[in-house]
Amino acid sequence: MSSDKSSSWSYAEGFPVEDAVVARARDRSFELGISPVSPGVASVLAVLAATSKAHAAVEIGTGAGVSGVSLLRGLPREAVLTTIERDAEHLKAAREAFREAGVAANRVRMIPGRAGEVLPRLTDGAYDLVFVDADKPAAVSYAEHGIRLLRAGGLLVLNDALDRDRVSNPAHREPTTVRLRGLLRALRTDERVTVSLVPSGDGLLLAVRR
């Protein structure tokens, strides 16, 4: 990345103004050893949620609620977010973030458990937006589930799609990086979706279900 591009990326990441609710959710994330989505990604999620006009959304990897709060702030008031997380402490922190954000309890369905076990139980074609921010080794499986869950016109968002700049460098051959690289290539030619790769944060893969 050239110095000019690096400066522009840093400027874009610092552009969003986050309030005390999100700041506290970030603090809880760090205390729990979670890497929350960056401010740039959080703002993109809110905009995508708002433009999608989604009524039903799924989040794979709740964390401490930074991304969930961002999604809910963009989603219509009647929309419901289903969020999946296997760690009880993370769910507790996210619940606090949602409460502080004034999110009504009936707008969030929090499912404890492993995503690989929960996702097969969700209904095909019943969701408008799927956000994936969980263990990267399973990203290929989560992306496939995401496409299955989406209605026509629904949006799949995969966080950290560039694997901290490793995907773009063929010299990096770590198993997770190789899987992500293969996933990006596969989705680029997948006739079920229209895709784009956005460099916010550590990369967002966007795929719209045709």
Image (tube, helix red, strand yellow):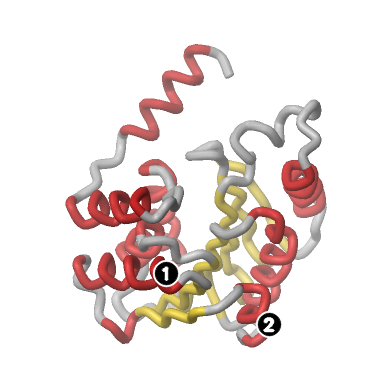
106 up-or-down from 184: above or below = below
Asked which quadrant contains residue 54, the reply is bottom left
Q: Residues within 10 Å of mark 1 (few under 14, many from 20)?
A: some
State the residue in front, 159 or 93. 93
Q: Which residue is mark 1?
A: 53
Residue at image position (68%, 33%) is: 166
Residue 79, horizontal then vertical, whole percent:
38, 78
Residue at image position (58%, 46%) is: 160
State the residue in front, 41 or 207. 41
The amino acid marked with disc number 1 is Lys
Quarter containing the C terminus:
bottom right
Q: Residues within 10 Å of mark 2 (few under 14, many from 20)?
A: few
Q: Is residue 57 left or right of residue 17?
A: right
Q: Is residue 140 left or right of residue 72?
A: right
Nearer-N-terminus badge (1/2): 1
Residue 51, horizontal then vertical, whole percent:
42, 60
Asked which secondary structure carries label 2, the reply is: helix
Q: Is residue 46 visible?
A: no
Q: Which residue is mark 2?
A: 120
Kindly report the distance in space between the C-alpha atoms of the residues bearing marks 1 and 2.
Answer: 25 Å
Total labels: the figure holds: 2
Residue 52, horizontal then vertical, whole percent:
46, 64
State the residue in front, 108 or 43. 108
Residue at image position (63%, 40%) is: 163
150 up-or-down from 198: above or below = below
Residue 57, horizontal then vertical, whole percent:
48, 73
Asked which quadrant contains residue 45, the reply is bottom left
Asked which secondary structure carries label 1, the reply is: loop
The amino acid marked with disc number 2 is Pro
Q: Is residue 79 visible?
A: yes
